[in-house]
Each structure stands twice: as structure tokens, then as C-alpha cells.
Image (tube, rainbow, N blue to C red):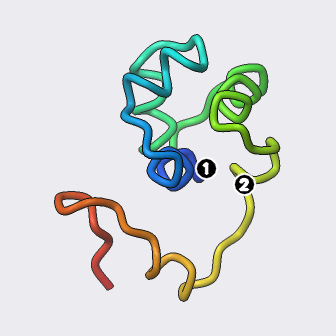
Amino acid sequence: MFTKVRYWRYQRGLSIKALYEKAGVGPNTIMRLERGNVCRLVTLLKIANALEIPLWALFALESDADRDRVEYGPKLRRQS
């Protein structure tokens, strides 16, 4: 399952540490979600609340144009 955790984390200017502390989850949870692993719905709700977004925004589909506009940082920038 792919979620947009990394996208929203970057949009909010949060590090992994800042997000997991704000959400009350472990650091491995954030890293696993950003790699596409699954987790419980309750965990996703905590993360969505920490990011100040509705839960559905973690699953919203994006167009290729939207994906290309996202800045992932120098080491994580997506290549087309």
C-alpha cells in the first residue's frame, strides 16, 4: 500500500523524527510507511492528525504532473 506520508511530511517541513514524535508512533513506522509497507488504520489516523490533513489525503491519487512538481530534497528527488 502506497501512502503519501513522505509527500506530506516534506510539504509540512517535518523530519522523520519530528513527525513520529508529533504522531506518537515509532520512527520505524514512518520509515516503513514511506517505503510502502502497511500499518493499522489507527496509526494512519495519528499520522494524518500530526500532519494536520484528513486521512483521505494520505491516499489521494496524484497525476504525473503533480508528482514532478514535488521537491523531495537533493538525495530523494524523483527521477523521470
Work out whether mark 1 precedes mark 2 in sequence or the reverse, and give the earlier one: 1
Vertical relation: 5 (above or below) 63: above
Give the mark count.
2
Q: Position of residue 75 (x, y in %)?
A: 17, 58
Q: Give the residue drawn at x 39%, y 31%.
A: 16
Kindly check if marks 1 and 2 are in contact, taking CB atoms under 8 A apart as contact: yes
The residue nearer to you, when weighing 55 against 15, is 15
**Mark 2 residue crowding within 10 angstroms, few (<14) / some (14–19) / many (20+):** few
What residue would you read off at disc 2?
A: 59
In which image quadrant can residue 39 be found? top right
Cα distance in 3D space between marks 1 and 2: 5 Å
At x 49% / y 27%, what residue is drawn?
Answer: 19
Dot 2: element? loop
Kind of residue sitting beneath label 2: Phe
Residue depicted at 51% across the width and 54% down the height: 11
For mark 1, what is the residue?
A: 3
Q: Residue furthest left?
A: 75
